[in-house]
Amino acid sequence: QVSQSNNGYSGYYYCARRLSTLPPLSPHRRLPESPSQIDMASPSPSPSPDWAGLPDDALLTVFERLGAPEVLMGAGVVCRNWLRVATGEPDLWRRVDLSDCFDPTIDMVAMACAAVDRADGRLEHFAADCFVTDALLFYMAKRTNGLKSLRLVNCMKVSHKGLVALGKRSPHLEELELTTCSIYISMKAVGQAFPQLKRLRLNNRWVNVECEEQFDNHRALDIASNMPELRHLQLFANRLRNSALAAILDNCPHLESLDLRQCFNIHIDAELRAKCARLRDVRLPKDSTNDYDHEAYIETLELNSLPLLFAHDGVFTQQYPFHGSDHSDEDDQEDLDVALGHLAL
């Protein structure tokens, strides 16, 4: 311990004496001119992470978070080890969601088939938009028998034939969504193909035109007659009338929730309120659409009429007389294509 005198110089002389005992500097050694020139000993850089050597369980967690499109298009082909896990773990492909990723420059059907193959018969949930066809449903039917949920949006090339083929192999499907899909899907055939169906979303787009309402009423009656196990039913922008809705409420005793938003042909009267009283959740035609998953704006078409749909043995055919029009047959067909194109949006 250094003792300090009153004049404060004792510490200074102590330090000077200590420095005098150190060995002299080498004549070839120069002091650094600035602190930046001091050669500080730095630790050796840490090695780069071995991403290719990640354990399988960690890779599976990453792939599950990324989702099917990203794994199919990129992450799954980073290296051989990642490709091995992406193609050799069927549990990774139990749930395949290819919605909101449609790209016309990519063969989306080939992507979907690859995902179905990788599931190796364990596919349980499948969702997609725009590109699904009956041919893809036939492909899925041959390779899986445990599908529980199918959600299709804007798939105009799907008919009840593809759904029936799927139902023959996966009759225990419980959830089905057909939002703005083909209008030629028989609900009678769907109900018979999936007798355990518990959740149905059969959604359209409301168009402000005068058109035949028999089609939607007929499909609603088919729901009432062939889907007794329904718990949840969404009929967004459907043109059914009170009588068809009453049939559903009378013949679906397990129904818990009903979504009738934008079903503007429904008149909410005392009788209907009484029938709906047993349900836990009811959305009425004019209720808010803020939480609806798809486009909900109402469109107006300036056409003389829309094609009329006629049922024969559960199968609908279209006739499209544009009354009062001077167009040729080719022009009428073009107008029809435009109308159906708007309805499919």
Image: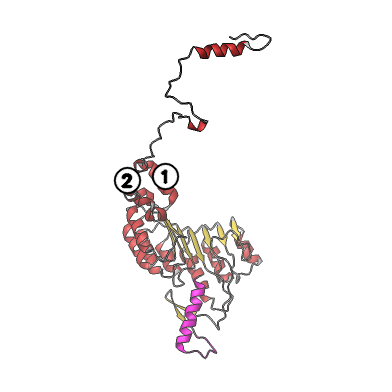
Q: Out of 33 and 194, give the one closest to the viewer.
A: 33
The residue carrying pointer 2 sits among few (fewer than 14), some (14 to 19) or many (20 or more) residues within 10 Å by Cα, namely: some
Decide: is 272 above or below 145. below
**Which of the numbered marks, if any, corresponds to residue 81?**
2
Residue 135 falls inside the magenta stretch = no
Read off the magenta span: 321-344
Question: How far from the left and from the top, in percent, is residue 44?
Answer: 40, 32
Front position among marks 2 and 1: 2
Horizontal arrangement in the rendering, residue 272 relative to residue 189 (left or right): right
Question: How far from the left and from the top, in percent, is residue 2?
Answer: 59, 9
**What's the CA distance linking mark 2 and mark 1?**
15 Å
**Which of the numbered marks, if any, corresponds to residue 168?**
none
**Which of the numbered marks, if any, corresponds to residue 61?**
1
The residue depicted at 58 percent of the width and 73 percent of the height is 299
Please identify the residue farthest to the front as the structure is shown: 27
Q: Is residue 67 visible?
A: yes
Decide: is 273 above or below 17. below
Residue 342 falls inside the magenta stretch = yes
Horizontal arrangement in the rendering, residue 14 relative to residue 127 (left or right): right
The residue depicted at 49 percent of the width and 82 percent of the height is 335
* Quadrant of the image containing the N terminus: top right
Mark 2 or mark 1: whose residue is earlier in sequence: 1
Question: How far from the left and from the top, in percent, is residue 130?
Answer: 44, 66
Callout 1, which amino acid? Thr
| Disc 1, SS | helix
Q: Out of 217 and 44, give the one closest to the viewer.
A: 44
